[in-house]
């Protein structure tokens, strides 16, 4: 069975992002970019499934600027077999990405599509759900455990008050949570080997997908700066301040 894994290039999670002064978005010029952390978990899971003999091929796919090739190469170094970049210099919103993924699914016919539960740049948390709807496939979202059986995927999801177990008919779309696994450290020889793995670059037009943005960001600004805290000498003063100044107890 073939697995498609969606990997997004995002601002590295250690970077403190600033808003642009004109309020049109985040200023990401010259900041470190990395693979979305949830997508690393998705790649790791695909590689573990391959190591367990349940998957025959892993295709890492990314949509965006040419530099997304680096993100795909990271997935290849982790153990993916080949990569596809759908290259676009214009902004790709979730629906456009979901449509591009659907077109790739139609072409590649995977039995499973793995995605992160959300991209840490826009926190949209909707691409997997949109893709499943476009395909008419079963979906398992925010999963923290995955088992593949005969034509079925059994997933565990963390929900309010406990764990939910779902049985999904394959082929299926799954979005992963951080608790699913701990992604492996990529070793230098694997980075070298990844350079020789195939990476196809195509344009959205070749997939017949209209990627024009549907949403407009009207205002993007940073939250107000937090006021400095104070130190209190004892618990009695703390309780007094919480009661009479902050009025929270
Ligand atoms: P989102 O719905 O934007 O929070 O993203 C959820 C997941 O969809 C991500 O973790 C990725 O697996 C996938 N995804 C979203 N945008 C892209 C993209 N431009 N390229 C590849 N995968 C993406």
Image: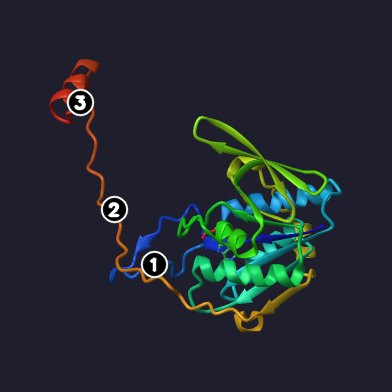
Residue picked out by circle 2: 223
Q: Secondary structure at mark 3?
A: helix
Residue sitting nearer the eye, 137 or 190: 137
Residue at 68% across, 78% down: 201
What is the number of the mark on residue 189?
Answer: none
Q: How far separated are the C-alphas under marks 2 and 3? A: 24 Å
Residue sitting nearer the eye, 110 or 55: 110
- Give the foreground label among 2 and 1: 2
Position of residue 123 in the picture relative to residue 20 (left or right): right
Count numbered badges in the picture. 3
The N terminus: image quadrant = bottom right
Where is residue 202 shown, x and y percent of the image?
67, 80
Position of residue 198 in the picture relative to residue 75 (left or right): right
Name above or below for residue 187 compared with residue 245: below
Residue picked out by circle 1: 27
Give the mark nearer the N terminus: 1 vs 3: 1
What is the number of the mark on residue 242?
Answer: 3
Q: Are marks 2 and 1 in contact (CB under 8 Å)?
A: no
Position of residue 129 in the picture relative to residue 249 (left or right): right
Q: Residues within 10 Å of mark 1 (few under 14, many from 20)?
A: few
Q: Residues within 10 Å of mark 2 (few under 14, many from 20)?
A: few
């Amino acid at each position: 069975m073939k697995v498609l894994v969606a990997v997004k290039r995002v601002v590295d999670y250690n970077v403190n992002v600033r808003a642009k002064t004109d309020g049109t978005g985040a200023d990401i010029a010259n900041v470190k970019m990395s693979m979305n952390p949830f997508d690393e978990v998705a790649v790791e899971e695909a590689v573990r499934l391959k190591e367990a003999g349940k998957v025959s091929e892993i295709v890492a796919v990314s949509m965006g600027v040419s530099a997304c090739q680096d993100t795909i190469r990271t997935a290849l170094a982790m153990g993916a077999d080949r990569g596809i970049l759908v290259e676009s210099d214009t902004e790709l919103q979730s629906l456009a990405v979901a449509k591009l993924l659907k077109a790739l699914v139609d072409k590649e016919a995977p039995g499973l599509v793995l995605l992160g539960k959300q991209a840490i740049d826009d926190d949209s948390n909707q691409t997997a759900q949109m893709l499943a709807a476009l395909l008419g496939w079963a979906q398992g979202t925010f999963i923290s455990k995955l088992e593949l059986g005969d034509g079925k995927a059994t997933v565990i999801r963390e929900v309010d008050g406990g764990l939910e177990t779902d049985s999904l008919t394959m082929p299926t779309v799954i979005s992963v949570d951080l608790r699913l696994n701990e992604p492996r450290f990529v070793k230098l020889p694997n980075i070298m080997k990844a350079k020789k793995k195939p990476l196809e670059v195509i344009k959205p037009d070749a997939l017949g997908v209209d990627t024009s943005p549907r949403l407009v960001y009207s205002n993007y600004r940073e939250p107000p700066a937090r006021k400095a805290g104070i130190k209190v000498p004892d618990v009695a003063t703390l309780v007094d301040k919480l009661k009479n100044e902050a009025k929270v107890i």
